[in-house]
Amino acid sequence: MPDLQQLPAVAELSERQIRGTACVYCAVALDNATAVDLTPRWFRRAGQRVRWFPRACPAHKDGQS
């Protein structure tokens, strides 16, 4: 299993951050050319297990700095 970096709690993120169109750390807008895919995660929403594909900007590719 890869070493997973700590991410902000899903409850604290905007819809754009959850959808991967904004960095999970700083909320800067992302596109396919600038986004860095982070390891997929699982979380619970409305009692269901949901897979989440968080993304970050290049400045935060190794986590919050």
Image (cartoon, rainbow, N blue to C red):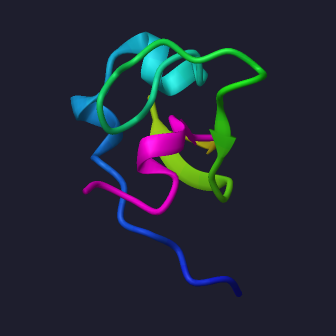
* Residue 55 within the magenta-colored segment of the rendering: yes
Residue 58: x and y, percent? Answer: 54, 41
In this rendering, the answer to whether 2 lies above or below 5 is below
Residue at the spot x=67%, y=83% of the render? Answer: 2
In this picture, residue 40 sits left or right of residue 4: right
Residue 4: x and y, percent? Answer: 52, 74
In this rendering, the answer to whether 52 lies above or below 20 is below
In this picture, residue 50 sits left or right of residue 6: right
Residue at the spot x=46%, y=33% of the render? Answer: 45
In this rendering, the answer to whether 41 lies above or below 17 is below
* Residue 56 within the magenta-colored segment of the rendering: yes
**Which of the 4 quarters of the picture holds residue 20?**
top right
Residue 8: x and y, percent? Answer: 29, 47
Residue at the spot x=51%, y=35% of the render? Answer: 57
Q: Nearer the viewer, residue 19 or 22?
A: 22
Q: Nearer the viewer, residue 35 or 7?
A: 35
Q: Quadrant of the C terminus?
A: bottom left
**Which of the 4 quarters of the picture holds residue 39?**
bottom right
Name the chief secondary structure element in magenta: loop
Name the outermost residue toward the front: 59
Residue at the spot x=48%, y=12% of the render? Answer: 29
Residue 60: x and y, percent? Answer: 42, 48
In this picture, residue 19 sits left or right of residue 51: left
Q: Which residues are magenta?
A: 53-65
In this rendering, the answer to whether 25 lies above or below 22 is below
